[in-house]
Image: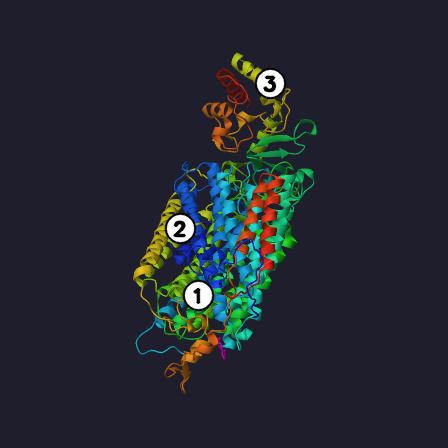
Amino acid sequence: MSISHRGKRWLYALVGLLALGLTACSGDEPQNVLAPVGKYALKEDRLWDLTFMFAAVIFVIVEGVLVFTLVKFRHRPGREAAQFHGNTKLEIILTLIPATILAGIAIPTVKTIFDVAEKPANALEVTVVGHQFWWEFRYTGLGPDGTDVVTANELHIPTGQEVYLTLEGKADDVNHSFWVPRLAGTQDVVPGRENHLLMRADTPDTYWGQCKEYCGLSHANMRQRVIAETPADFQTWLAEQQKPGVKPTGGVAAAGQKAFLANACVGCHTIGGTEAAAEVGPNLTHLASRKVFAGALLELNKENLIKWVSDAPSVKPGSRMPSGVKDLGLSPQDVQDIVTYLLTLK
Amino acid sequence: MATVAVDQRRRLFARPRATTGPASWFSTVDHKKIGILYGVTAFVFLLIGGAEALAIRTQLATPNNTVLSANTYNQFFTMHGLTMIFLVVMPLGAAFMNYFGPLMIGARDVAFPRLNAFSYWVFVLGGIFIYSSFFLGGAPDGGWFGYAPLNETLPGPGMTFYSLGLQILGIASLAGAVNLIITIINMRAPGMTLMRMPVFIWMTLVTQFLLLFAMPIIAVALFQLMFDRVWQANFFNPANGGDPLLWQHLFWLFGHPEVYIMILPAMGIVSEILPTFARKPIFGYAAVVFSGIAIGFMGWGVWAHHMFAAGLGPVANSAFALSTMFIAVPTGVKIFNWIGTLWGGSLHFRTPMLFALGFIAQFIIGGLSGVLHSIVPSDYQQTDTYFIVAHFHYVLFGGSIFALFGAFYYWWPKVFGRLLSEGLGKLHFWLMFIGFNLAFFPMHIVGLKGMPRRIYTYPSGMGWDFLNFIETIGAFTIAVSVLVFIVNVIRTRKHGEEPGDDPWDARTLEWATSSPPAAHNFDEIPIVTSRDDLWHKKYVEDPEGQPVPVIAGGADAQVEEEGHGHIHLPSPSYFPFVASLGLPVIGWGVVYNKPGVMILGGIVILLGVFGWALEPSVEEV
């Protein structure tokens, strides 16, 4: 990877303009397309390397010839323009050269198109549902008694295994596009349809992504993380997710659960082991096991949760979650209690 | 043309007579005045769309910025796209096609002068209609591509204005297309065979055919969207069995030819400017013309490359990848021919030439990045990122807008009789060239670093901050360059050099008449004997094939004073303007679902069309 990276750097330097912008390293660039991981992103990247190389060479040649022409044939006193109308042979040659190059590139292109669309055996299957403005992930049949394990915004996957995502477009939602650049290119989530996307991570890491198809007011705030773990860690995580929600033990958390169930929260969210079983908003059964929430916009901590529960639309414009204080009539005490409860839901 | 005596019937309006003064602009049917109207209006919209771009760039200059709210940002990027496409690049093309189409083919006017005025008025009222949404509850905010079903679920009247406004603008484009096609086919001067037409006229013809077939497709989609939004139909609503992908197919089946509608006139302009300033004929005329036609045909077979990630499946994606690669071939042919035109020439780097060369240099980049998008698996990464934003700005700004500014400098002395300042022109070019590349080249890189399009904010720590800041500096540099152009225009009104009829020693017929041209264009319709007819009337070839000026007045056809008295030009008319007034009224009626208002608009159109039909096209004063 380091070699291909250096090669790319060199090509950009060749292109010349503003190579400065590339000097920053990919370490703090969590969505860098040019730092691919896993076989699907790498296949796409290899094709990019090939075509970009051709493009860079053609760019240098054509712009070079253009500049050369401008210098060589600039007007000087006493020099007349040569009066010729064309050259059929040259025209044919110059048509055939790009046609041949393109035909050459077409072959690996078509091959890769089919490659990255082929469903492998033994892939982990996860359903991805796009909502305005957050992601729902369903591990079909992996819950207790054949139910689904449902989580939001953080997609856990085991390393070393292909993951076959079914992108499900809810009929009453809008277009989204699921994109985790370092793992794979994008596929759209189209209402009323199902698309598929394959990815595979070979090293444990957290891979960032965000919605790529304009989906309304908070399109910019619809993000996601893919957490790739060793198969053992993944199984541990899965086992935790299969459990029902933690029952509150302390006084404040119990009050929080009561407030949660007595207010409008219960109309949209599910918390396993309680009567909250609605599927409009994210499943909160293991909310506190996540690092981020609200479309991976906010880090999960008490302060952010209080802000969010009190007045979600002020944090994320156009949020479907109403303002807890203004719209749902929660008191500041209710908010405190609910957040305390939510933070116990490991 | 037959003339009709003034009849004594009572009329709604007295037939307008004035050809000067403010009122005459509302009644003119002169293709040159209509061309100027198109140009001025489109330039005003360019300033508005540019201001939106500056607001967008200001918001994105730094991470987590709050200059614009999400709501305002989404309206601005949508309106920026709609404005630049439908209210700037297309009508600027129309301005030059209107003004110079008849002049370059040796005609006195377009085939249907009143329809021409109607096209213009529908265009300007369509633009005003869309912009009225800012004051009537919010502008369109679903992107210029307005994907379903978001286009139906967005609150506020914005997307209803979008559906109606683009339908109105489509009527303007359709009427204009019919008019220009018939003008070019039927009204060429004697001897102006198809293969003697200037390349700009060829590209105009191809463009108008594209409009003729593309606008009905988007009209269907917009009509369905209007019914979905206003009368709860379900064409695109998946919750009730509609299909959002139907919108994508219809939109891009229009939308891709639309790209060529915006670039082909620019290619035509460049093909006029280069030979003039290289002082030699265009290289491979036939190849340039046929590659333009080929692009026109092949442009219909590539639309789904906008939908590679929509899940059409590997077979469809492969097919559209191949057709997209294929269309790069005729585009490449054009680049080679332009360089061939420069090769061996005696290149004069006047301002129009600089813009034409800027076009070529930047279009090469936009073309190459376009080929990169055809590589479907790479496009899965690039689509909907700033890489795409960079690509199409290199084509439509670095390409079309540069060529159109070149056209301003090139043809200004013909239209206004005065030369724009060369010094300010060069300053304009270099500022715009630097600003453009500063604003848009980093977008390639920031796109590859994973920055999606259409996001109103972004966090820091993504590796995007520095590049975005540079882009904003570039955007403001572009704004400064446009200010220089405005200063140049104002200065030229009083102080511009008056260079005579043919300041560039050019090649085509528009330079054979006076600057500015008389209302009837040519005192005598020219007889065309060759391609680049004017050039061949000015120069003969010596034994080595080098041009030698023709002695004494070869370029000036003898003026027959006798003939002048018999030129009958179409008379001015208010009715095209009246008829067009009804369209936005119907639009507002639909937005607010008020049948009375719709009927009122219909009545206005009916009155306008009746008056139009009943008045003779030519009346003697």
Residue A127 as seen in the image, left or right of residue A61:
right
Q: Earlier in the sequence, mark 3 or mark 1?
A: 1
Give the camera-side residue of B107 and A106: B107
Q: Residue furthest bottom?
A: B543
Residue where numbered disc 2 is placed = B439
> Is residue B237 among the parts visible in the rendering?
yes
Residue where numbered disc 1 is placed = A62
Badge 3 sits on which subunit?
Answer: A
Residue type at tag 3: Leu
Residue B291 as seen in the image, left or right of residue B315:
left
Give the camera-side residue of B496 and A334: B496
SS for tag 2? helix
Count the marks.
3
Give the camera-side residue of A84 and A163: A84
**Residue at mark 2 to residue at mark 3: CA–CA distance:** 52 Å
Badge 1 sits on which subunit?
Answer: A
Give the camera-side residue of B356 and B39: B39
Whether residue A9 is in magenta: the answer is no
Residue type at tag 2: Ala
- Above or below — where is B481 with respect to B100? above
Q: Which residues are magenta?
A: B524-531
Q: Residue furthest front?
A: B8
- Specify the principal SS of the magenta part: loop
Circle 2: is it few (<14), some (14-19), or many (20+) Cα within 10 Å?
many
